[in-house]
Amino acid sequence: MILVTGATGSVGRHVVAGLLTQGERVRALTRDPGRASIPGQAEIVRGDLGAPDELGDALRGVHAVYLMAMGGAPRRFAELAERCGVRRVVVLSTSDVLDNVERQPDAVAELHGAFEHAVARTGMEWTFLRPNEFAGNSLHWAPQIMAGDVVRAPYPLARTVPIHERDIAAVAVRALTEDGHHGAKYALTGPQLITHADQLDLIGAAIGRTLRMEEISAGEAREQMTRYAPPAIVDAVLGQLAAAVHHPPAPTGTVEQVTGRPPYSFAEWAREHAADFR
């Protein structure tokens, strides 16, 4: 049995589907089973990573876990998982995490680094997935695209290597079901370095419209973003975008090395998600 946390999330739902396709028994963890859209072959259980001490039943009989860095109690969850007999954990982390440093560079890296550390200190096998920017991050432009042809956003020239959520899930499925991934810290990227303005152009092409990005200041963006996200997380995101203007990441090729196929492009992601912007 494999437990998938965040089973209704953008990556988790593809992990569930991929495992089921391979004939694995899947237990999907969600806070609201009544609203969860999960394939019927999966066992759905209620649970919250914010209350790990209540997850004993969810972990019973589980040999592997796909773990999202959520809930704020990574050490308690990792210790409980090990006591329950879990042998393998795949952590969805972030490329922001740095190794061999006393302090992580920002709040996002600190959160994910805490989960990595909690799992690594156990006797379980572990694999860390460290994706660059999710292609799906562009979905936060959807309300502006639905309202008009201009998207107001900071750092239009920030260059990233956005990755399709299905590529992250494909690597996760391999790491959950195959030997040989213990101790791996997979830097996951899409195939192409592109700017945020380029991403908007590709979304426009997918929906048959010409879109334009109008730059706003980091201060204005921060004021808007802190209405729905913690300030420390907002500052981390804006700092990453500022850095990506002049010091962008590079494509890694890891998705193809692990799965045997090239990663999806942002253009493919945009066409797949065109309805989300209409």
Image: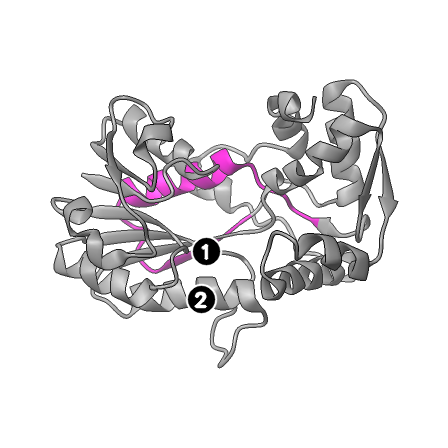
Q: Residue furthest top?
A: 208
Along the line of sight, the residue nearer the viewer: 47 or 111: 47
Task: Locate the C terminus and report the quarter of the image it occupies.
Answer: top right
Residue 136 painted magenta = no
Q: To which quarter of the image does residue 195 belong?
A: top right
Residue 110 drawn above or below residue 253: below
Image position, residue 171 (x, y; %)? 41, 41
Image position, residue 45 (x, y; %)? 24, 37
Disc 1, SS: loop
Report the residue marked by disc 2: 113
- Mark 2 belongs to which amino acid? Gly
At 25% from the left and 42% from the top, the residue drawn is 3
Report the residue marked by disc 1: 93
What's the magenta region?
160-188
- Mark 1 belongs to which amino acid? Ser
Task: Locate the N terminus and report the quarter of the image it occupies.
Answer: top left
Q: Residue furthest bottom?
A: 102
Q: Are marks 2 and 1 in contact (CB under 8 Å)?
A: yes
